[in-house]
Image: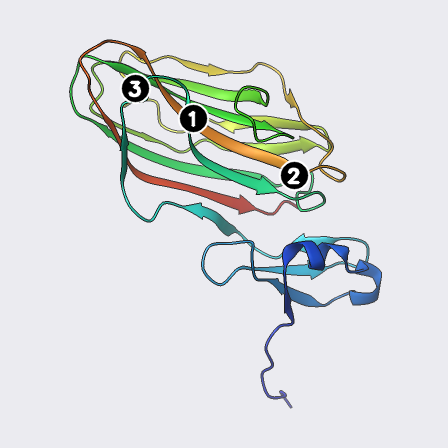
Amino acid sequence: MISAPRAFPSTTLAALLALPAAAYAGRMVRATDYGVGFGSLWFSDGSVWRLAGPTQVYNTTTDFVGTYAGATLVAQVVFPANSLRVGDVLGLVIRTLKSGTADAFARNIRFGGTGDIGVDSSVFSLGYGSTNTATAENPRLKIASATAIRVTTIGSTTSFSGGTSAVGASDTTIPDIAANNNYLSITFNKNAGSAGETLTTKELTITHHPGP
């Protein structure tokens, strides 16, 4: 006989990760402050807490526009210590429109332990060529080890006419995910031109996909 449904226990992610996984083996708990909307569900396998399924952790609610004369932070997510696991993937969707065909812009993804875009390591940069009036990309980043992140997919590059991409040939070193907070930061900047064109972000989402 199936018992009456009960709500999952709920708490903050920090409090959840502090719970002894061994004492909650096989249990699900909802983190109210991690994940767009209802939060996220976490499962104890008896040794660690694991994200139960793909969870959107960032989503723009409205378009935003900028001229980006210098490197400008447009989105940032913090992954608390012990919330990422080896094999987890961070999937991004980025859609932009440019107001003309003269100026060139660039997008950079940084990952590190400070949240400072002048300090944390660049993981994947991409140039939006001057002839581009629309871009669409779906980069994916994999936690390759406790101290390394890897670009596994750069997404569609067909819309980046005149642009350049830079994907590291080797993994990028990051602070140990078990002991440190890590920040994923996205920046835009104008890297050529003086026409005063603007870049409008139509969509920007970040989804945390749990690994094996």
Callout 2–callout 3 Cβ contact below 8 Å: no
Q: CA distance from mark 2 to mark 3?
A: 29 Å
Name the residue beneath numbered marker 3: 160
Residue shown at 72% from the left, 28% from the top: 147
Residue 156's spot in the image, x, y percent? 35, 27
Residue wearing tag 2: 87
Q: In the rendered image, which quarter is residue 196 located in?
A: top left
Q: Is residue 98 left or right of 38 when viewed as pictured?
A: left
Query: Of helix, strand and loop, which one carries label 2?
Result: loop
Q: Quadrant of residue 143?
A: top right
Q: Earlier in the sequence, mark 1 or mark 2?
A: 2
- Give the mark toward the camera: 3 or 1: 1
Q: Looking at the image, which residue sits at the far right?
A: 22
Helix, strand or loop at label 1? It is: strand
The location of residue 125, given as percent across then percent down, is 45, 19
Residue drawn at x 45%, y 30% is: 186
Q: Residue at x 43, y 26 (%)?
A: 187
Residue type (three-letter) at the residue carrying disc 1: Thr
Q: Height in image: 1 above or below 6?
A: below
Residue at image position (62%, 29%) is 114
Query: Residue 96, how many percent across, how many down?
Result: 28, 31
Name the quadrant containing residue 119.
top right
Dot 1 crowding, Cα within 10 Å, few <14, some 14–19, many 20+? some
Give the CA distance from mark 3 to mark 1: 17 Å
The amino acid beneath tag 3 is Phe
Of marks 1 and 2, the one in the foreground: 1
Q: Which residue is mark 1?
A: 187
Callout 2, which amino acid? Gly
Name the image colouring: rainbow
For mark 2, does the 10 Å Cα neighbourhood hold few (<14), some (14 to 19), or many (20 or more) residues? some
Q: Residues within 10 Å of mark 3 (few under 14, many from 20)?
A: many
Number of disc labels: 3
